[in-house]
Each structure stands twice: as C-alpha cells, then as structure tokens.
C-alpha cells in the first residue's frame, strides 16, 4: 500500500459524508461550463455535485488520505453501480448486499491502495454503508439510536416525520418536542467536552468561546421548524441514520446521477496541504473554490495567508465559498482591493441552507 494510506483505518475517516448543502454551494459558486475548480474533499459528495455545472477540471484536495479514499470509492461507485445500487452501498437505504456490490462491481475499479483500505473496512460499511462509517456519522448514530429513544416515545418520534405546515411545526416543537430531556441530552452529547472526544481537530474547539451545544441546539430547532424533516436529507440522516427517497443530497438524486456518472474523471484527487499545492501550482488559475469551513481550523494569520494564496491562484471573477460554524472567519477588510463580499447573496442562500450545523455562509468574488 502507498505510504499515504499505510496503517490508515476507518477511524481516520472524519466525515464519510459532506455536511454542507451542495444546492447552496452551486448557487454561490456559479460555475460555468469549462471552468476549473478547487474543492476541499471532505467525503467528496459536494465535489461530485459540482460536476453538474460541467467544469473542465475539479482538483479535490485533502491532507487526510482517508478522506481521499472516500472520494475514490465514490468515483468507482458512480462508474459501476445503478442509482438504486449506489444508494444501497452508500447507506442511504437499507440493504443486505453491500459486500456483494462492493466486491463484484466497485472493488475491481479501485487502485490497489484504495482496495486495501476499503477491504479492511468491510465490516463497517456492510452494516452502515460507505456514508455511515465516519467519526462524525458514528457520533450522530449515538444520538439517533441511543439518546433519542430515551428522550421521546416512539409515537412522538413518528409524529416528527409527519408532514406539517409551518404553524404546525412551530406548535409541535414547542408543545411536544422541546422537553427537558431533549435539552439535557442535547447539551450532554454536543457539549465542547463531548465533541472533543471526536478528535477531528481539537484545536478547532479550543479556539472559540461560544456555547457549542446551545448554538447547535438553536440551529437544529430552526431546521426542524423551517423544514418538514422528510424534505431535508441532512436532518433525516441525523435522526434516522439514513436518507429519505423524498429528499436526497444533490449528488445522490436520481435526476443527477447519469450526468455525474458521465463526468467523474474530470475530478483529480490530491493528498496534501492546500497551501503547499497552491504554492507549487501558482500558474494554475481557478474559477471557483469550495473551501468548506477550512478557515475555522486556521488562525487569523493562517486564514489571511490562505486567502492570499487563493487570490493569487484565481482568475478574475472567481468565487470563493465557505461556511462558518463556531468561529467567525471572513475576508473582512484585508482584501477589499481584491475581493468583493457578496453579503446579500450569501445571506439569501444561507437562509435556504438545509444543513443545521453552520452559523454563516460566505461568498467572496475575486476582482483584478
């Protein structure tokens, strides 16, 4: 096996899905046919969703080789599986043949280093699917499988999934859902101390002073009131550990599947630091940058340095999209000669965002 994946296990997958809304991302980036895109990998879903805009190239980068392994297995899945089979192996729907799909169809297309990695994880994705094996997804399973039944009776949980009007959702949340056990368990599971045990990036949690659980609870409340849960793939997975066919993330929707399948080789994966990649490829100019919430993992000084690198590697008119969860990170006044903050557009799209873990969405446009 290559050095990058040697000794890596399922525990090294921090996120086995993307938890940012690709519909919002696509509207924010405004990628045109033939554009070149740089995208943070995460698990790859949003990078594949960007193929719908027909870019000529998407460089998908992550310093964690296990996250790139998530991208590469998806590439093989798109190439070999029918839509229904893809959802089975992904974990979006129940299945008793995930290993069969992997071994007979997907595995032969993987490079050897990715074969060895996923072969060692078969017990996990046989049970939960490729999209359910990450640290964060395991933590959500602790919530949905163990905490939720102690918070509410089955009838109340079932009622959560019934279609309601906005006024009915407001009444349901305040009168039936928001009880003391809900708040207590939520504060216990999503406290700073509990989330640190995920060990995804401890510095991330040390570098801010907000009450994490209170902020996430407020966003989940907002999501449960704004959306019927069955229309929201992110909330549905959070509460059930799978998706609803009524609402799937962009890259998993049936109407998008064949388009994405036909373009997967436009994606080029890179294992490494984004700063190093940009420095080594300074002549490679991009039209769009999907930065996930990378800036929250960086100091203000490092945020400034990375933004500067993005500007250097950008075509005029390029857009940079990124989210904030707990830390406030934006280009602010530092780049007002090179970046326009599309605040009105950002706020409008954030109001449509179906994910519930973030506090802000930013769109910066490069000007020369």
Image: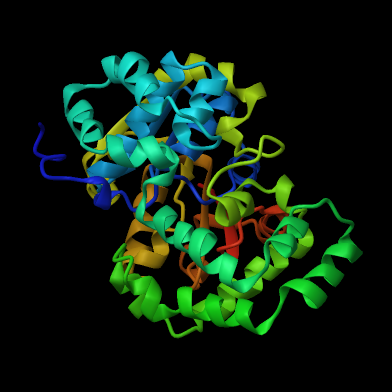
Q: Quadrant of the N terminus?
A: top left
Can I make out residue 277 in this image? Answer: no
Residue 163 to residue 315: above or below: below
Q: Is residue 335 left or right of residue 134?
A: right
Q: Residue at x 73, y 46 (%)?
A: 231
Q: Position of residue 240 (x, y in %)?
A: 58, 51
When asked about the image quadrant of residue 164, the answer is: bottom right
Taking the spot 40% from the left edge, 40% from the top edge, the residue there is 127
Question: How many marks are shown on the rendered structure?
Answer: 0
In the rendered view, tell whether residue 247 sits above or below residue 363: above
Position above or below: 107 against 23: above
Q: Is residue 82 above or below residue 151?
A: above
Residue 298 placement (x, y as % from top left): 34, 66
Residue 50, image x and y in percent?
A: 53, 33
Residue 153 quadrant: bottom right
Looking at the picture, the colour scheme in use is rainbow
Foreground residue, 270 or 231? 231
The residue positioned 83% from the left and 51% from the top of the image is 163
On the question of residue 169 being in view, the answer is yes
Nearer to me, 296 or 166: 166
What residue is at 48 percent from the left and 46 percent from the top? 18
**The one of 196 and 87 positioned closer to us in this rendering:** 87
In this image, 175 relative to 214: left or right?
right
């Amino acid at each position: 096996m290559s050095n990058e994946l040697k000794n890596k296990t399922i525990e090294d997958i921090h996120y086995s899905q993307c938890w940012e809304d690709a519909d919002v991302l696509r509207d924010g980036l405004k990628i045109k046919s033939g554009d070149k895109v740089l995208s943070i990998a995460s698990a790859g879903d949003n990078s594949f969703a960007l193929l719908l805009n027909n870019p000529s190239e998407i460089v998908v980068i992550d310093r964690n080789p296990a996250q790139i392994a998530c991208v590469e297995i998806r590439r093989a899945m798109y190439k070999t599986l029918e839509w229904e089979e893809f959802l089975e192996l992904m974990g979006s729907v129940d299945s008793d043949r995930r290993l069969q799909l992997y071994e007979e169809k997907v595995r032969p297309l993987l490079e050897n280093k990715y074969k060895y990695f996923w072969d060692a994880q078969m017990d996990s994705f046989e049970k939960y699917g490729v999209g359910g094996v990450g640290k964060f997804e395991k933590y959500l399973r602790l919530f949905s499988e163990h905490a939720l039944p102690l918070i509410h009776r089955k009838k109340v949980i079932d009622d959560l999934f019934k279609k309601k009007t906005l006024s009915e959702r407001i009444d349901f949340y305040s009168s039936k859902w928001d009880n003391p056990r809900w708040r207590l368990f939520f504060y216990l599971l999503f406290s700073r101390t509990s989330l640190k045990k995920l060990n995804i990036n401890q510095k991330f949690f040390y570098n801010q002073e907000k009450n994490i659980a209170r902020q996430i609870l407020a966003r989940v409340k907002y999501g449960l009131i704004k959306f019927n849960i069955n229309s929201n793939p992110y909330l549905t997975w959070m509460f059930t550990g799978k998706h609803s066919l009524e609402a799937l993330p962009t890259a998993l929707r049936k109407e998008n599947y064949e388009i994405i399948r036909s373009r997967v080789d436009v994606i080029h994966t890179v294992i490494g630091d984004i700063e190093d990649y940009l420095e080594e490829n300074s002549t490679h100019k991009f039209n769009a940058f999907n930065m996930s919430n990378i800036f929250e993992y960086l100091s203000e000084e490092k945020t400034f340095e990375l933004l500067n690198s993005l500007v250097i590697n950008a075509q005029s008119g390029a857009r940079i999209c990124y989210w904030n969860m707990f830390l406030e990170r934006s280009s602010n006044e530092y780049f007002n000669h090179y970046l326009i903050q599309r605040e009105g557009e950002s706020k409008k799209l954030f109001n449509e965002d179906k994910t519930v873990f973030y506090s802000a969405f930013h769109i910066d446009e490069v000007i020369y």
